[in-house]
Image (cartoon, rainbow, N blue to C red):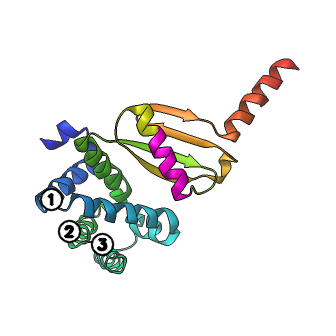
Amino acid sequence: MASDTTGATGLAGRYATALYELADEAKALDQVAEDLRAIARMIAESADFNRMIRSPVISRAEQGKAINEILSKAGASDLTRKFAGVLASNRRLFALPDVIEGYLAILAGRRGELTAHVTSAQPLTSRQLSELEATLRKSMGGKVSVESRVDAGLLGGLVVRIGSRMVDSSLRTKLQHMRLAMRGIG
């Protein structure tokens, strides 16, 4: 079974593996990855979209129609739209964020790439992202793709996670360490 070799497990892993295999057959791995990254951004940026994919109140047909319309307007490929329709008709649209993560992990794993999950207090510029990617590539000794997100609660700095490794240089963490050190003094 393909999921045994990719590390994808569970419901989302099975769907991610199936999507990967379909995209591979259609020679559309990169197009589907691009579509999925765009969907992930939409989920992160729109509370209504997030609610729609998770709501048990919305019928399968309504979810299917909505996701198809949204993805059509976003310019997603037929394969991505049809796959999201299958998720909706099987009442599995709630798993879409995990399917996206699983697909991208499978794609990166098969290509020998590492994915760095970077959280910053403010959005990183394209120059900062490219410099960070180059630094990570040099330190990890291979191709590294950067997935970035913003968490204003960090106050400043970055949190970088690659696999099980994490480097937290955020101002929030430094302040927490100082607070703990100060408690020890008093």
Give, as a three-letter code, the residue at label 2.
Answer: Leu
Task: Write down the region rendered in magenta.
Answer: 125-135
Q: Nearer the viewer, residue 118 or 87?
A: 118
Calculate the distance from the C-alpha at mark 3 to the C-alpha at mark 2: 8 Å
Disc 1 crowd rating (10 Å Cα; few below 14, some 14-19, many 20+) is some
Q: Which mark is residue 22?
A: 1
SS at badge 2: helix
Q: Is residue 95 left or right of residue 77?
A: right
SS at badge 3: loop
Badge 1 vs badge 2, beta-carbon distance below 8 Å: yes
Calculate the distance from the C-alpha at mark 3 to the C-alpha at mark 1: 15 Å
**From the viewer's perspective, is residue 20 above or below residue 182?**
below
Disc 3 crowd rating (10 Å Cα; few below 14, some 14-19, many 20+) is many
Which residue in the protein does label 2 denote? 79
SS at badge 1: helix
Q: Nearer the viewer, residue 104 or 65?
A: 104
- For marks 1 and 2, the one nearer the N-term is 1
Magenta residue check for 126: yes
Residue 4 location in percent, x, y?
A: 18, 37
Magenta residue check for 13: no
Disc 2 crowd rating (10 Å Cα; few below 14, some 14-19, many 20+) is some
Which residue in the protein does label 3 denote? 76
Seen at 58% across and 57% down, the residue is 123
| Location of the N terminus (image quadrant) | top left
Give, as a three-letter code, the residue at label 3.
Answer: Ala
